[in-house]
Image (spheres, rainbow, N blue to C red):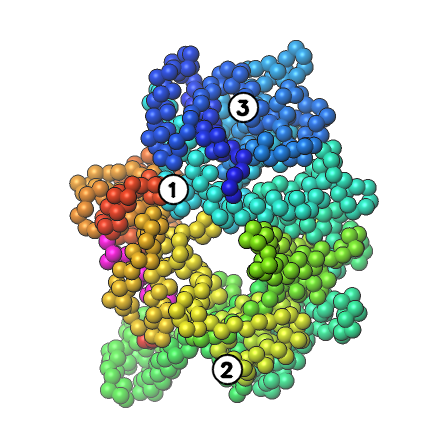
Amino acid sequence: MSRLNSYFYDIESLTNAFTLSCYRPDDQRVDIYYLVDDPALNDKDSLDFKKSAARRIREKNQNFKGEIYYYNLCSSAASARLAQTFGVSDAQYVNDPQAPSSFPGQFRPVCDTDAGYQEEEAPYLMGYNSSNYDLTMLAYYFTRAWQPGESGKRDRFSAVTAREMRDFNDELFSRYIGNMRLRLWQDKTMGLVAKNFQMSGRHIDVAQLNERQRRVGLKRLLGMLGWQILESDKLKPGPEELADLIAYNVSDVVNLKELFCHPYYQGQFILKKGLLGQYPDLIYQEDGDSYQAKIGPAFVRKDRLTIDSSSANFARRTICPYGRLKDDRAVSFLYPAASVAEKTGEKQRDILEESRDFFYKLFEDENLRKKFDRVYDYYKQFAGKNFNPSKEYREDYGDQALPVSDLSDVENEDTNLFYYQKDGQPSTCYITFSVGGLHGSEYNRDLYLKDHALWEKKQADLAYVQKLYPDPLDLRKAREVTLPDGRVEKYQTFLTTKATIKLMEQTDPADRGQFWRDFSQDEPTVFKKQGSRVRLDDRYAFTSSDLTNHEDFTSYYPNMLRRLNAFYNDRLGEDRYTAIFERKQELDKKRTDPQYSDEERRMFNIEREGTKLILNSATGAADPREGQVPSSIRMNNRIRSMRIIGQLFTYMIGQAQTYAGARIVSTNTDGLYSVLDADLNRKILAKEAAEIGVEIVPEELYLVSKDSNNRLEASPDLTKILSASGSLACRKDTSPTKSLAHPAIIDWALSRYLLEKRTDLAAPFDRDLGRQILAEAEEAFPDPAHRLRMFQNVLSANHSKERANCIFGRGDAGQLLILQRYNRVFIYQDGLPKTVHLYSAAAKKLTPAMLNKRKKSGEAVIQHDQEALSVLKANGLGNLAKGREATVQKIPNLSPDWFMHVENRAVNLLQAEEQEAILHSLDYDKYLDLVASAYEKNWRNLTTSGPVL
């Protein structure tokens, strides 16, 4: 965005200082509002202190070059200025300029619904996690600072102390951390002030624009994107320490602007802002019974949406702005909807029954049919039942309402099914059915067969030994046995650990069979029970690599929902979901049409992203699990029906292709990757797509796939990597939408390696090839800042008492170095200066067995490592949860022997010589170790059959 009138702000609250920094990038200035309980610092606003703070701010923030203004909140003028900036009102309907408020009229916030509102004149106020914390703190501050005066208005200023603000801060974090605004409603004025911040439409919580990572700390995201990670220590009295605190505070707001300028945040802001402009019913009440918005400041909805509202809320309100939609009485597998079938002349079909008929026609073998019937029986449990727990469902159906069924009541022990070949043999590919979606991949059949042959051999050996020694006591006394092939095995191979000569002699010979080992329970299986589910045994995970036909089911869920008439709104007289889908299809063409200008195509693309946001969020918004979650489009039964029908359709396509000779190496609900002759593949797809009523466009590409979440797609000629997901997702750069626990260069190098070694993924890691790939990093990432982001590793501490885990360092001389919560590190060559050896101070949970052992031996129950305890205490975690002790641990994927360089300044802004100094100090061999480890642990196909018994 070329220009946006925005203020970026953040609050710091310590025992003797409270600050709010407000960065105004358009004006190139930062306003510092502060409360300090030190009388020396409140004495006529010391010029020395201001100079010291300004020097620290510029010293610590290379990307801030503007002016600095100070406002001491001990004065009414400063507090009034802050109130006018943020807008303070306890009016019941703040959007109505005539609504009465107990605060002075000049404090009323400018609202985006005001007549003549111009965003150029009224800034957006942007914080991070501000809707939970900062606005709660401000509501408390303004209500305390402005008390009722003689006029009845809150125009009497009463100074607040930093200590009082800190006490309130501590109360929020100790009792209300999940929903801090709950605390405000102990005082109605406070609650209304906070509510009206958001009703103005100008307060934006930037964290909410990134819904996947909204709970991730700002400093971690900034570090990932190459900006500085600057944290404050506990503030002690004195001007120098306060100047440092302000510098840290300014760092957060200056760099919050950098985060907001990332294309992902920009895109979310623009598209949600666009939706608010496109659909006024997201903001305004209904005009009578017209199902049209009544636009005007006095008619703003109490539950209006704002730019930082969730995608689910946008989906709910866009599809059904007023009232609510009615769910089906029960789950049904009839398709399409009766109204659609009547319109198109189709016959409704029960897709669950159709899928069984489909399988039965292909295979007559009763054993195969029983395997399919596991899936059939699983889904049959849903038919005719109600999974909607809401009071609205009970209101809609009254006496006809069905009792609520719960997913926990549905038996789902084994919903895995192989794709079967024409001869009835299982393919190497399988699928897993579930309530939410379909997933499938290929398993390591060669390894499984080797393991099974080994087990069969062990069974045969046992049978031979039992025949040779009918009485196991004789084997025990013989101590070893020679097998027919000449192998010599000790008795322990065939007898249990209880088989002592003394015990066996005391046992009746007829009962000595109990001492033989039972190998029957050790039979290898492709799928095994893990918790409450049966899943693929991790041992048989397999990385597929082949030229595939990618069958992307175009807008699969949206088309299914349309065909089931899921979101038809009687009062609106249309299915707005369908209208949005059709608009998306139109925009798909327009955004690439050369007859439009670049700017027009850009706007088409932004609008298209808005339609996708609604379409993709609708199913989740319509299927909340908890009964108390409000949703105007709640239809648990209809969405569950759609998801199961969709899975069955996808399965039938994949099974039809397997029957014709395909390998379905990867399956998702909305797409398949098929290894099959392209012409035959298209022929099968055409037939199946017509049955479903969904457009399926096959595309040839090369696929390397570990599972449905981790894959790499390349052009058929292998010259270009088209996309990568899961553990390869950051191959191009770090991203605020991805949680990255290793250097991004690993994703890039591993992607290159997998494609290069695509035909030999069972081989050990080729270090020569890996080294060659890493050597090309300079050419691949010519911008030094970009390359530094790729090689950095951002480490974060966990500050919960239950799982406390803090990073610390030791220098070459062994001296202890306390590090901050978030740190950017690089792996340096051995022996270089400015390096440390890194460890983790953790709160280890002691097992009951360990506790009992210590008690019995008279040892201290809790045995803290004193170094680890001192690190935890330095991080404010001295009081650990019960049953945990401080211990030193290795940081995952990092060796304590490695020489690590900590660099928390912005690598994006370092001087060229500083950037090059870091890049030339990197230890490529150790980064190569990380690439090798990622390959060996996650992508290499096992070929040897180790012990499985």
Crowding at dot 3, Cα within 10 Å, few <14 / some 14-19 / many 20+, comes out as: many
Crowding at dot 2, Cα within 10 Å, few <14 / some 14-19 / many 20+, comes out as: few
Depth order, front residue of 171/612: 612
Residue 863 visible to an observer of this rendering: no
Q: What's under tag 3, amino acid-wise?
A: Leu
Q: Residue at x 55, y 47 (%)?
A: 268
Magenta span: helix, strand or loop, mainly? helix
Which label's residue is closer to the chain start, 1 or 3?
3
Q: Residue at x 38, y 52 (%)?
A: 741
User: In the picture shown, does residue 322 fall above or below 443?
Assistant: above
Q: Which mark is residue 227?
A: 1
User: In the picture shown, does residue 508 fall above or below 172?
Assistant: below
Q: Residue at x 60, y 46 (%)?
A: 272
Crowding at dot 1, Cα within 10 Å, few <14 / some 14-19 / many 20+, comes out as: many
Q: Which mark is residue 325?
A: none
Q: Residue at x 25, y 77 (%)?
A: 490
Residue, disc 2: 677
Depth order, front residue of 401/338: 338
Quadrant of the rendering where the C terminus is positioned:
bottom left
